[in-house]
Image (cartoon, grey):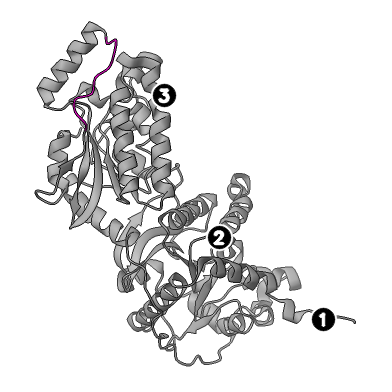
Amino acid sequence: MASEPGARAFIEQVLDSGSWVPWDDPEPTLADVPDDYRAALARARQETGLTEAVLTGEGRIAGRRVAVLAGDFGFLGGSIGVATAERLLLAMERATREALPLLVAPASGGTRMQEGTLAFLQMVKITDAVAAHRAAGLPYLVYLRHPTTGGVLASWGSLGHVTLAQPGALIGFLGPRAYEAIRGEAPPDGVQSAENLHKHGLIDAVVPAEELAETIERVLNVACAPHPVGVRPPAPYGSVPDVSAWESIQRTRRADRPGVRDLLRATALDVVHLHGSLEGDVDEGVVLALATFGGLPCVVVGHDRSGPALFRSALRVGRRGMRLARELRVPLLTVIDTPGAALSPEAEEEGVASAIAHSLLDLVRLDAPTVSVVLGQGAGGAALALLPADRVLCAQHGWVSPLPPEGASAIVHRTPDHAPEVAAAQGVRSLDLLRHGIVDRVVPELPDAAEEPESFLDRMGLAIEYELASVLVTDPVSRLTARRARYRNLGRETLTSDT
């Protein structure tokens, strides 16, 4: 089990040396406090040197101003009473007024039982203050320390744009003592551990406190990056030779073709991989990350070509990325590279079609700038769920099709043997997509991304940087109007009239 340093020790460990500036009010007082509770408060203040169970203030991480709220378990178990909640509320409101990123680091057993229901309802106003901070487009970052349970976990401890946790920390809705008293047995070993919650998609990463500042720095480099003031010159795309659809499809199926993880490693900086939906969904078929390309920020949601076929859970993780882009006011970069959604009874029963529909619903109206990259395979609804964007790039051999060509052939010809002809007829290849206005630019492969991965990824990285700059300097209303018009008009040129 983890050991828990106090709030002061945590602050000294994470912030730049000498940068801490406290915000706390004078010692809070409560009216009509029973004598035994008054004595407990006095002992806690004497033992910890604190006036309440949280410290609030500001400091710097890598020179950047950050508001910090840190709990101290040594003060009555870090419990949250009325005075504690008021301190949290005032600090959150100040951070919002001063447009500061907010790092909260609870260590708490939850609601202060000595104050009962009135303390319990403080969760509502704290949550409202978190909502106001996020609505202002400001990063809200959570670091769960040992232990974090009860009402703290069920309110401000579970609302982070990014949620990290201390190794070995006990984290759970019902603390072990209450769990055993109510259920008559101890909770199973390991269930309420930071590592187990990470496994189940409720925490992005388990990070030692001594490494936290470096991780937070990378997050803020993305979330607080300045936007460009002008569009860079177009990236050098070069000419694209005319190859058959079937040749491109075969090339994208090569096992050694670079995927989204390779793209991030080779061309992005400040990469922070996020994990799951933070609502219990984990799927290795999708990558979610924060990153910068040429200093330009984005949230990345991409198909992992080495992962399994996509289930509903993958698209729920992807939708989290869309929410992050909207709330942090940074572009969303989607990367398409999938053989298709999972085809199984389990996929049908969990509603993969509904998940595709809701992903599309979020994406077509997303008020953040969007750039999409067709990096390889683009089969079916799994591809479509991440495709609509303000600007769409396509690798030379990338393709988009309603079904894998073999499946389309089976529908049309009742055999998969005509897949090459069906792919050609459907117009799935990059040059066809460009001709129909489905993609905006094609990035060459010379002759195949798998044979020149570094050079290809460099070209794609430059293309992404250019498109991110383009969407960032476009008026938001005009950009969204143009996106909607693009897809409403798609295909109308093929219609004929009898008039």
Query: Given the image, on which type of amino acid does mark 2 rest?
Result: Leu
Res 109 visible:
no
Compare marks 2 and 1 and give the one earlier in the sequence: 2
- The answer to the question of whether label 3 and label 1 lie on touching residues, with beta carbons closer than 8 A, is no
Amino acid of disc 1: Thr
Q: In the image, residue 344 lies at what x, y percent?
A: 60, 52
Does 4 sit left or right of 266 as displayed? left
Q: Which residues, given as a range, are shown in magenta?
A: 25-33
Task: Say which quadrant the N terminus sits in.
Answer: top left
Dot 3, crowdedness within 10 Å: few (<14), some or many (≥20)? some
State which quadrant residue 31 falls in: top left
In this view of the protein, which residue sits in the foreground, 253 or 481? Answer: 481
Tag 3: amino acid: Leu
Query: In x, y percent, where is residue 6?
Result: 15, 33
In terms of sequence position, does the residue under pointer 2 or pointer 3 come before the other?
Answer: 3
Which mark identifies residue 496? 1
Location of residue 432 with respect to 120 vertically, above or below: below
The residue wearing badge 3 is 121
Quadrant of the rendering where the C terminus is positioned: bottom right
Pointer 1 local density, CA inside 10 Å: few below 14, some 14–19, many at least 20 = few
Labels 2 and 1 touching (C-beta < 8 A) = no
For marks 3 and 1 on the same chain, the one whose residue lies earlier in the sequence: 3
Task: Name the mark nearer the viewer: 2 or 3.
Answer: 3
Above/below status of 417 relative to 164: below
Q: Please give the label number shown on residue 363.
A: 2
Q: Is residue 155 left or right of residue 370?
A: left
What secondary structure predominates along the stretch shown in magenta?
loop
Residue 213 position, x and y percent, is 20, 52
Badge 2 element: helix
Residue at image point 33% right, 80% down? 454
